[in-house]
Amino acid sequence: MVTFGDRISVRLCHDVDCACALWGRMSYTGWSALHCNMRCDERALDRQIGLDPQSLTRADRRLLTASCMAIDLSCAALFLFVTFSIYTFGLAVSLQRNDSYVGRFTKMTMRAHRKRLLKLSCGALVLVVIFKFASDKSVFSMRLLTSMKAVAVGYGRRSALSQEADDSLSTSLCPLGTETRDVYSRRRRRSDDACFASAEGRVYRMVQHADSRTAYCVIPKASCTFWLSVFRWLNEDTYSVSYSNPLSLTRRQVQNRPEKMRVYAFNATNSPAFLENRFRFMFVRDPYSRLWSAYVDKFLLPNFWKMYGWRIVQRRPWNHTADERCARNISFSEFLDYVTSTAPGSLNEHFAPYRLLCSPCVFRPHVIGKMETFGEDARYVLQQLNLSRFASEFSSYDKHARHEMTMLIDDVYLVYEESFFKFCTNTTDLAARLWQVLQINGYLPSDIAFPWNKNKHVNKHALKELVLEVYSRHPNRDEHVQKIQKEQSLVNGYRTVPDDILAKVRELYALEFKMFGYDPFPEKLYGYRNTSMTNLDFPFRE
């Protein structure tokens, strides 16, 4: 197997050959022979390193061209200087045998400049040695060799399948326009460029379907429940129960450990062999929105009280016994302070940085979907899976909203069956929390208070009927109204967060902002930092 060291050695040796050719051509054609440099690069990439220069991204070509020119020019300068030194030395020796006035003058001149010539020779030699052997010492050379290694080992390379995916954007079943194709290309180029700045990362969870030759990299809080249900259904991993479509699976069924569908985890050096033959896609989300969604889903609702809530409560300078055990009243600021103060590798996958869950430098996706354009992106991916018939299931906002609300209520009441949560909450508090979460997500109007008092027992069927009735009678059935209310809830949530914690959020997710084109200073969150805070406490706090 050819190692990275072998590839670099071949590259350097080939550059010496190019420098020789460059020196030979300079004798006849002058500095225009520098055009040889690009041809040498392409031959080395194509024949000896095994990369097709036409398949490289713009960042790949720019970086490789700069590095190859630096190496080539250094080798050419060395050959020129050595040749000049040999010529000068031979001239001096020949003149020493001549006793004429000219010979004596030349010998005096050579003696006067002998030390200077020696210093220049040593200096040139030292520069060449430093350039060749100090690559692991200098910051520039480390970045240069890291980038060349990226191209050589594959995560800086676009495979033939990647090119097929590009072509499929124009020939797929969906008649995508030029603008849509450009969107996907720009997203991939942006992530590729960010990978050259920082190529760290791994794939924590990936699932695939062999028949459709498709692989999906899982990022929680970025439509992962929907896509996992699709791949569960495709792999017939539905606990021996037949379903007519993927949306029939419950959230708990989707999130449970699979029986047939295998989950893969890997990094850049041990990716599965079949990955090159899969259409690969992933979905991302604005880090600010994702953190807010994780807090609402896992800490306003009781899902993470037992797992991570107590860790946050323990950070408080004061504790009440009930709060310490149940962790039921954690604020958004406390949650963000915990996330930004914990080592990224120790964070739960619902709020860990993307590079630790599904680094595009490792996964190399053909399509990077975004929650902000979920409808269009999901429709295209479903067509790649030959599941276009299910696109209408989520294209109808009303149908999607009813499905999300009922599935969320079922899931939370299932969590409540554990004895721990029965001690920490009751059905009325649980229903009130669900009511507020549905308001935060924009499904229920924000001006309608929870209608039942603290002492009433609320079962999930009664709550479902009430929620669907209120939803049907108010304007939140309109998708535009829902989005406005949901965005306002996010803005209100971040108004409670101090500036120093927001600065730590930007630092933790800096690469994600750059890699996927999200604004680290969105106007909606930073334009009104001096406005009054909104109280997000629950009505039934004890």
Image (tube, rainbow, N blue to C red):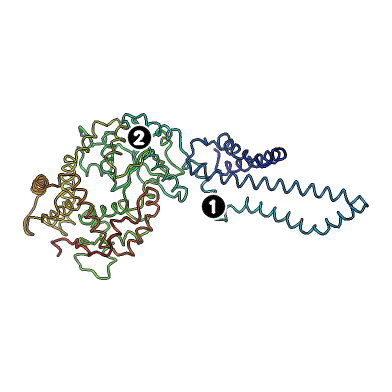
The residue to which callout 2 is attached is 214
The residue to which callout 1 is attached is 142
Q: Quadrant of residue 168?
A: top left
Compared across the picture, whether 140 is left or right of 28 comes to: left
Could you classify mark 2 by the number of other residues whose Cα lies within 10 Å: few (under 14), some (14-19), or many (20 or more)? some
Compared across the picture, whether 107 is left or right of 504 comes to: right
Label annotation for residue 341: none
Which of the pair 479/153 is nearer the observer? 479
Residue 146, compared with residue 379, is above or below; it is: below
Residue at figure coordinates x 62%, y 46% from the top left: 71
Q: Which amino acid does label 1 sit on?
A: Met
The answer to whether one can see residue 242 in this image is no
The answer to whether one can see residue 405 in this image is yes
Name the quarter where the N terminus is drawn.
top right
Residue 204, horizontal then vertical, whole percent:
36, 46
Residue 67, compared with residue 160, is above or below; it is: below
Which of the pair 253/114 is nearer the observer? 114
Name the quarter where the C terminus is drawn.
bottom left
Q: Quadrant of residue 526?
A: bottom left
Judged from the image, the secondary structure of the residue bearing numbered disc 1 is helix
Compared across the picture, whether 287 is left or right of 155 comes to: left
Q: What is the distance, in whole Å, between disc 1 and disc 2 at their CAs?
A: 35 Å
Residue at figure coordinates x 46%, y 35% from the top left: 159
Judged from the image, the secondary structure of the residue bearing numbered disc 2 is strand
